[in-house]
Amino acid sequence: MSVFRSRSALRWLVPSAAAVVVIGGGAAAGTIIASADPALPERSAAQLLVDLQNAKVDGLSGTIVQSSDLGLPQIAGLTDDASSQLGLASLVAGSNTARVWYAGEDKARIALLGTQGETDVIRNGPDVWFWQSQESAATHLKVPAGAERKKPEALPSGIPSSPQEAADAALAAIDDTTAVTTTGAAKVADRDAYELVLSPKAQQSLIGQVRLAVDAEKHIPLRVDVYAKNATSPAFRVAFQQISFDTPDAQQFVFNPPPGTKVTEANSGQIEKDIEKSAQKHTPAEVEKAKGEGVKVIGEGWASVVTATLPKTDAADGEKPAQVEGLLGALPEASGSWGKGRIFAGSLFSVLLTDDGRVFAGAVAPETLYEAAAKK
C-alpha cells in the first residue's frame, strides 16, 4: 500500500546549510543587458529583478538536485556521518535529489529520504502531516486560524530547500554592496532562462558570485549557483532537473498513515502552553543565562560577521555531551590577541568558536573572524 494515493514519495536529502551565506550580502542593479538567445527578448538586470519579485505560479512539480563541494575538512562524526538523516557528509561534497509538489499556499509537499528511512511533510489546507518511516510515526497538526499562508518547513529555518528559497535569500539583501549584472541565456530543466549575477564588492568576502537562472516565461528561479572567489565551478548549486507548471492532482497532498503507524495529534495551542509551562520551572536569571547574549552583526554586506555568546552550563546543570566535546576537539586550534579557540573553514564560509564561549561566523576568511573577535 502506497503512503500516498498516487505515486510514492521520491528521494530528498537536506540541501547544504552553507547556502545560507547568500543572505549576507547586498546588491545594486546594473544596467547591462542580457545577451540572450535570439529567441528571447533582451532583459536588463533591473528588469529581471522585477520579474523575480512579481513571479507567481499556481502550481508546479519537479525534481530538484543539490550539489556541493564546500572545501570543508573531514571531521569524524560531523562531516562523515552518512547514516544520519541530517548528516553533513553528503552536504560537504556530493549530490542530493528532491521531489516537490506545489498547488498553492495551502497545498505543498516535500519528500525527504535519508539512509535510515523516509520523511514527508505535507500541507493540505488546514492539515499538516509530518511522517517518519523509520519510527513508523506520523504527527498531524491543524494550522491555527490566521496562519493560513504559512508554508510547511521540512528544513531548519534559514536553510534554502529550493531555488526559490535560495534566490529569496539573495534578493532580500539587495543594496549597494553588490554589483548586479547579466550574462545572457541559459538552459535549465529544458527551459529557456536568463542568468542574473550578484557579485560582492567586498574584498574580504569568500563569495565570488551568486548566479540565478530565471525562467524566461514564468520568471521563477530555476537554478542558483554560489561560486567561491576565483572559482570556475560552483561550490553550491540547487537547481530543477525537471519541472512542470501543471497543477499537481489533489491526491498528491492526501496522506494515508501506513498500517501500524503511531499517529500523534498535535495542537498548536497546547505546544505553546507546554513551552510556557516549561519556562515557569526556571527563574528569570536561569532563563537569561540559558539564552546567552543576543546575536550581533559586525561589519556590513558580504563581509559582515555574525557573533553571539553561547549559553553557559555549570557542572550542576549538566556538562557538555562527550560527543560535542569530541567534535570541538577535532577542529583545528586557533589563537590570537582575542584568546584561543577552534576554527571551521571552507570555501564559502568560516566559523570561529572561542574558548570563552563566543561564536563568530561569516562568508569571510578566518582572519576576518579573528579581527572581529579582537574587538571586545
Image (cartoon, rainbow, N blue to C red):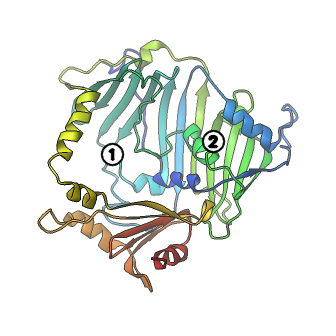
Q: Is residue 273 above or below residue 327?
A: above
Q: Residues within 10 Å of mark 1 (few under 14, many from 20)?
A: some
In the picture as drawn, the residue positioned furthest to the bottom comes out as 337
Quadrant holding the N terminus? top left
The reply to whether residue 60 is in sight is yes
Q: Going by the image, does 2 lie left or right of 220?
A: left
Measuring from the top left, give residue 284's x and y in whole percent: 22, 54
Distance between mark 2 and mark 1 Cα atoms: 24 Å
Residue 347 found in image quarter: bottom right
Dot 1: element: loop
Vertical placement of 52 versus 1: above or below? below
Identify which residue is drawn at 45% across, 53% down: 91
Q: Which amino acid type is marked by label 2?
A: Arg
Image x and y of residue 41, in percent: 86, 32
Q: Residue at x 23, y 64 (%)?
A: 323
| Quadrant in the rendering for residue 334 | bottom left
Q: Amino acid at mark 1?
A: Gln
Q: On the rendered structure, is 234 left or right of 63?
A: right
Question: Does 283 sit above or below residue 167?
Answer: below
The residue that appears at 49% across and 41% down in the rendered structure is 161
Tell me the number on the disc at residue 116.
none
Residue 80: x percent and y percent?
A: 36, 59
Q: Is residue 82 above or below residue 240?
A: below
Q: Which mark is residue 85?
A: 1
Tell me which corner region of the image, top left, top right, bottom left or bottom right, holds residue 376. bottom left
Q: Which residue is mark 2?
A: 223
Residue 9 screen position, x and y as percent: 40, 27
Which of marks 1 and 2 precedes in the sequence? Answer: 1
| Count of residue discs | 2
